[in-house]
Amino acid sequence: MSEPDPFELTRTLVGIPSVSFEEREIVDFLQIRLEGIPWLETSRIGDNLVARTDFGKNFRLLLGGHTDTVPPSDNADIRIEGETIWGLGAADMKGGLAVMLSLAETVPNPAFDMTFVFYAREEVASEHSGLKEIVLSNSELLSADLALLGEPTSGTVEAGCQGTMRFVLELNGQRAHTARPWMGDNAIHRLGAIFEILNQYEERRPVIEGCQYREALQAVRVEGGIAGNVVPDASSLTINHRVAPDRSVDEAENYVRELFAPVLNSSDTLSLVDSAPPAKPGLSNPVLAAMIGRYDLEVQGKLGWTDVAFFDQRGVPAANFGPGDATLAHTRDERVTKTAVDSCFLVLKNLMESGL
């Protein structure tokens, strides 16, 4: 069997546009490759692919990654400079997809039963996630003893993830002419008390299974006002809250409501409009622990949200491990190096071949 070239495959995948909801071309490409692998059974559900072995092993390892990208930002065209690929999705996460496909094609007798999941629409609202589409069709396809997602982590293990919540706070006032503002109640000015709370917010930094997380509470959108000569009677503020894995979404929601309650009145509303739960680190999983120990991999908590939470909620320990720098994701400078792709491939190949 010829040696794979996951870096060259990364270049091929970056060259296939796959903005969210437009993944069909890349999924068609992946399907042809996966269906040519005799030791895998491949299922296509919409624009999602699940390829599995069935050797009767006592442990199943799932490798997963999303096929979509965000819209381009002056980086739609692929560029190669030496051993670096520049382009949309290079880091997030076509390098990871290339590693997955290369492993699927080149390890015919793994130490574990394997599941490879290529899923759609991760970069948009969670309600559109391809993982949910797979569950509705056949939830058993996602059963596993450990899930590793190829999100960009610079080759470190990012354990668990923080949850994310989005609130909309609507403040009410009383409309008046700006020449007689004392006759009204400026709803935009009322936001001052909210911003003071946000500026004084002290983030929690809990350490869980040796991983430090760092919560955050940020205003991300503000709206208000109808005309230049009218005291506004309504304003709206969108707030994002990042939640460490030692708290549930319900606990975090109660915390936020208590935080703002002293400056709200009965006509104001604070609505939770979107949320995704955090995920525990899962470092006690024996296969994950073996991989970390064998290569002395750096481990840190994942501060952002990823689909490891989806698997954690289903009782599957999960972590992020993939090539590429997450800080470059979604930027015009997005790129990935050959060293990053190859080293990630070799770690996972050794894990699949050697087991514990």
Image (cartoon, grey):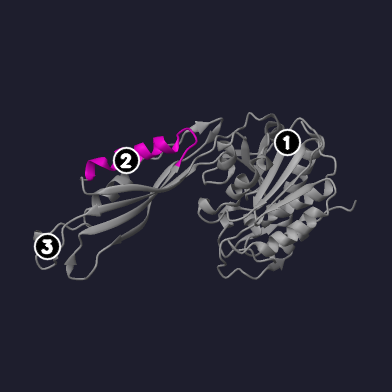
Q: Which mark is in front, 1 or 2?
A: 1
Question: Which contiguous range is marked in magenta?
Answer: 243-264
Disc 2, SS: helix
Residue 123 on the magenta segment: no
* Residue at the farthest front position: 137
Point out residue 2 in the picture as x, y percentages from the top left corner: 89, 53
Disc 3, SS: helix
Asked if residue 157 shows in the view, the reply is no
Rendered position, 103 above or below 206: below
Location of mark 2 (residue):
257
Could you tell me how far apart the alpha carbons at marks 1 and 2 are, in whole angstroms? 41 Å
Point out residue 333 in the picture as x, y percentages from the top left corner: 59, 63
Amino acid of disc 2: Arg
Rendered position, 49 above or below 209: below
Location of mark 1 (residue):
60
Sequence-earlier tag: 2 or 3: 3
- Image quarter in which the C terminus is found: top right
Q: Which mark is residue 181?
A: 3
Q: Nearer the viewer, residue 38 or 89?
A: 38
- Quadrant position of residue 211: top right
Disc 1, SS: strand
Sequence-earlier tag: 1 or 3: 1
